[in-house]
Amino acid sequence: MNRMTFQQLSRLLGAAAILLPVYLNAQSLQYEPYIQPGDAGPLGPTDQIVIAWRTTETTPNATGYTVNYGTTTSYGSTATGVGRVVTNYLAADKTLPIPTTAPGPHVNYTAVLSGLQYNTTYYYQVKGPTLPSGGFTASFHTRKVSAPFAFSVEGDEGYFPSNGANPAADANYEARIVHEIYNVTNLSVPNAPRLPSADMVVIAGDNVYNTGAESSMRDYWFPVWNSDKDSSDTGAPLARSTPIYVVAGNHDTGGNGDYVNMLDGNAGGLYTGNSEGGDLMGYFNDYYYPLNGPAGVASQFIFNGDSSTPTGWTWSYQGKSYTTTAAATAYRASTAVNTGNGTKQQSDLMSNYSFDYGNAHFIFLDSNPHLFNAQVDYTAPNATPEVAFLDYPSVLRQWVISDLDSSSKPWKIAVFHHSPFSSGNGTVRNFQMRSLVKTLENHGVNIVFSGHEHNYQRTAPIVALPQIAQAPTTATEPFVNIDAAFDGSNDTVPDGIIYIVDGAGGNRDFDGNIASPRGQGAQLDQDDSAAGTYNLGGGLTVPQGPGTWLDTYLTNVAMAPFIPHAGTAPKITQKFKAKVFSFSHVVVNSDSSMSLYQISEPLQGTSSATSSEPAPYGMDLQSQPLNDPLPDVLVSPATGALMTPPSASGTPGLLDTFTITKPDLSSLTQVELNAPDSVRKGDAIPYRVRVSNNSTNNLNGVQVVVTLPAGVYYDGSLANATLVGHNQVVITVGRLGQGETHTQVVRTLTSSSVASGAVLTGSATVRSATALPLSTNSASTSVR
């Protein structure tokens, strides 16, 4: 067994030597230093960052690694690297079979740099026995506390699809997107202004394929996102300088996101995308995010409504099933780390988390099927009727409500992998998160980013109606209302949440009728440039392009065999780009303005368009055919080495852009707070808030925030209220239409310690997803 482990380790390191620079000791350092936010969510008095790296050492070096850091290259402060062993967790149970490809132990190091100033550039140097003599050096910028700031979004990137040819080769499309994100401020994008650099990056899940294994992180992610060379062929040194926030998709948690076969390892090996054995869910070992999510909802729990069982981790190898507690405990223990707020097991808490950046609050959520009774269905939409999902677990819903209500940031952004409103036929049945959208809407979310479908989509602003989580049908009222007038340029105040699918990060394209390895071959073309018809079989011929998209009943034309008039109501999707890889670049301009630019991969200066195929790669924002992408970057499926000449430079296309604004409606919205002039000592004080919307905008996500004076306590009687801290009562109104008025009474208790003659003054603020916040008058009450 020892000899086998050494052989496997040698084979792994041989491949790593191809990908890492020559000055590295390939027998010791696997992942060059990279930065992570660690366990830091809300903006506190100071910021922090985690420097992480990985070596092939089998035991941690307690004193050998240091990180020097400071606001100049003279540094001035030092932190010590703390290592923990991450190994094949199957070895903890000698009754389990261990695949011959199973890895040996390695050490993951972290150093927490705390007490940092916000909005400040820091330089760092990592020194230790596996690093070059001068150390590893880079820099990063701490979080901003206000606008402007910018972030990039992409998803579904971590894999090199095969070309299916002889000789075999894999295509690395991921590198060109990473390269563009790293250089976004220097890109010349037609019809777009010069864009600011990304202060952070958001990945919408399916970070690596196929099962989220550590080996896939080694092969597909770290060599690209932390490449020493900056190019369309290799990626960029992004991870060492820019914080990257990732949400866990189904491929990050075992494959389908329902059950995780922790003993998987039947077909492991370099560049296979498969587990090598005992190395599943590298997400919880290699990333370090805030650990402020709820416990008891991790991937080992299968939820049936609000009940759950710890049956989500299975143990099966070559057709035989096993049971083990020791191996499961070993995996969870390997994720235990202190990244700023005490030692915690990341596998228990990191599936759901939130944080602040600038004037925005971000909430990242697990959307995987284990939360919905492990329901997974990829059947074609024309085959059978869709089936509704069980409700989102209450423990998670309450955490979402508490988290969103606790933030006063003007922008609230949600990220989860499975889009509730994807028009793509490949994933149209995976709509489990529709049961949460009304909660997000009522509690102030402006925009939702997802992946899962391998393309870019943007919906019209959506307001969910009561039957939103039911199986689609045309026999009722519509499931959603849409704001068809919103165009993001002339009309920029959305009536509802905008849902973005950002799954075009580098794995093969869905829904674009593109050949392998870029796409999946001949199929229904749903890109918004597509025309003509397509025969789905069974005598059903449907239009291509926009005619295939979901309508306000959440049906499409492929469902016509069992839903009358399916797909004939107004479409909820406004943009659908499926033929080129792309990413979103979002600029938060101010408290009242946010803009998104959808940027394609680099393109050649020529097009392969013909009269019969005038836009083979779709159209840009100006409805002009896009030029062809740069030639495929092919790598060896055995070693990852480049097989094609270096790429020439290319010019990206602008696929979409829109702006969201939040108007000042203070002159058109009346807000009044009332309280009794006086009360006797110990009496209750009722605070009455009245909000009238006299504007021409419907207000979504309306909340009244009542701030109580010292000595006055909320009595907890409102079902639609959250107590934040000890003196703020956040009351959720939800939607307040044009001309509507809402009155809310907050009942409180007065402490017996309040002295006679005291004057107690309360205040209130009204906030919404639609408009800037409004403050009420103060209301004073004297104590007799």
Image: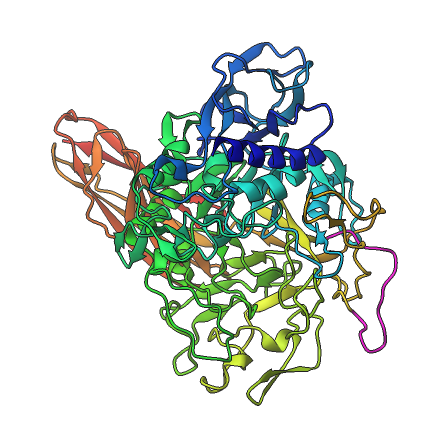
The x, y position of residue 296, in whole percent, is 30, 44
Q: Closest to the observer: 16 or 220?
A: 16
Q: Does the magenta stretch include residue 612?
A: yes
Characterize the magenta stretch by its predominant secondary structure: loop
- Residue 503 figure quarter: bottom right
The quadrant in which the C terminus is found is: top left
The x, y position of residue 380, in whole percent, is 51, 74
| Residue 667 seen in the current view | no
Residue at image coords 58%, 51%: 155
Q: In this view, does 187 lie above or below 439?
A: above
Residue at image coords 21%, 36%: 713
The x, y position of residue 506, in whole percent, is 66, 52
- Residue 722 figure quarter: top left
| Residue 174 seen in the current view | yes
Q: Closest to the observer: 13 or 777?
A: 13
Residue stretch rendered in magenta on the structure: 601-615
The x, y position of residue 405, in whole percent, is 37, 44
Q: Closest to the observer: 378 or 466?
A: 378
* Side of 214 where 303 appears, left or right: left
